[in-house]
Image: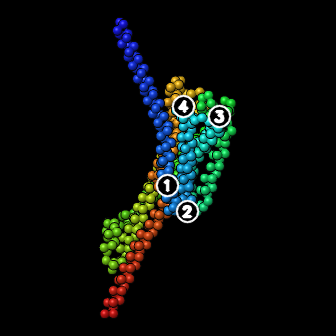
Amino acid sequence: MESNKSLVDLINKASVHQRADLEQFLRSFLRFLFLAIPVVGLGLNSLALKVLSGRAAQDQHRFNHGAGLPLAAMTIADQLCLSSYFCWMVMFSEWGLSIAFEAYTKTVICKVLLYIVHSTSAFSLWCWALLSYFRYFAVYKPVKYQTMTSEPRLAVGVVIAICFVLEGWILATAVYEPTQNVCTEQLSRLTSSIAHVSEMTWTYFLPMVLIAILDLKVLCRQSNDTEVVVQLRPNKDSLSVNGKLPTSATLRKTSPRLMTKQNPTLRKEAVMFLQEKRWMSERRDSRSQVNMLYRCLYIALLDLAMNLPSYCLRLYSAIFYASPFASERISYYAESVSELLYFSQFCMNAIYLAIMVYQAPADSRRNTMTTSYRSKQSTIDSAHSSCRSVDQQRKRRELL
């Protein structure tokens, strides 16, 4: 019996040591992620800024009057947010450096870092809503969208001013707590709850609703446009000649003599060829627009989803003044994971901006129309040239 008891004690001690080692490993891994994510995000955002600056150099007008300016402003805001977060982790986290500053100096640093993190993250989310509005405006008001001059710059400026003004309460309330080495707020419980709920409403839930409404309306409109393009396809049976559709090779191999006015059959084939080519171009353009909108919607939903755990935990704590988890250990890991997801979104934004080439629907449609017009004009010029050569040959025969 005693030997069995000692064996059980050894097993229990071994399991306790294993759990302690696992706990230590998880905390070390989280420490690594908390420091690595800002560094990786800063590098990716630098790459995104380089890509955007290259696009601005290629087309300055489109960059200043389209979506390039909001994207660049959002990238700079993400840079500031990640830099401030990294400084905060180094100075005030449980594994940060113990830098000897006076309490007043650390209070000032707390105010500045928290203010920058909250303001820039709010501006980043509102930039997604601003881009959704630009997509909506480009689809429903394409002519006005193409003639915009200072509206994008004005919109970005207004959003920056609103975000930095509404987050000003942090500068007045944030203080440094020397006993716990943390930044906290000098507010009553009720006032703090109201302030946090209000902030989460206008920085997250309101832009989330706007993004969902605007992008869904754009997708519905684009789907309807695609159906219209499919329905407007030329009737092959009525325009075909001898049951066959013409091709570009057929038109090129046709004798120039057949391009005269006395040959309505070939004119019918040329009309059918141009209409079919234009329909295919419009259909391909509609599909590319819908695919682009889906990509934009997916990345916006991913960004909002990465914010959701952090905002849910903050909302629960602000309303009920407690953690939603009974275990302190589970609460620690849940808050850590939600914070990692929250700041990882800025890395995802940078990857999205560096890889995806933004094209407005109106620009794509304009390019397609230009290509179709040039193709049609080229075919018409070729027909006129053939007719002139036939006329010249006829005149030479008459002189002989």
Q: Which mark is residue 50?
A: 1
Gap between marks 3 and 4 measured at Cα: 17 Å
Gap between marks 2 and 1 measured at Cα: 18 Å
Which residue extends farthest front?
A: 100
Residue for badge 4:
94
Q: Position of residue 233 (x, y in %)?
A: 42, 61
**Nearer the N terminus, badge 4 or badge 1?**
1
> Which quarter of the image is occupied by the C terminus?
bottom left
Gap between marks 2 and 4 measured at Cα: 48 Å
Three-letter amino acid code at the position of disc 1 = Lys
User: Which residue occupies the foreground of this view, 206 or 239?
Assistant: 206
Residue for badge 3:
103
**Nearer the N terminus, badge 2 or badge 4?**
2
Three-letter amino acid code at the position of disc 2 = His
Which residue extends farthest top?
A: 1
Residue 82 appears in which quarter of the rendering? top right
Q: In the image, which is nearer the foreground, mark 1 or mark 3?
A: 3
Tell me the SS state at disc 1. helix
Residue for badge 2:
61
**Nearer the N terminus, badge 2 or badge 1?**
1
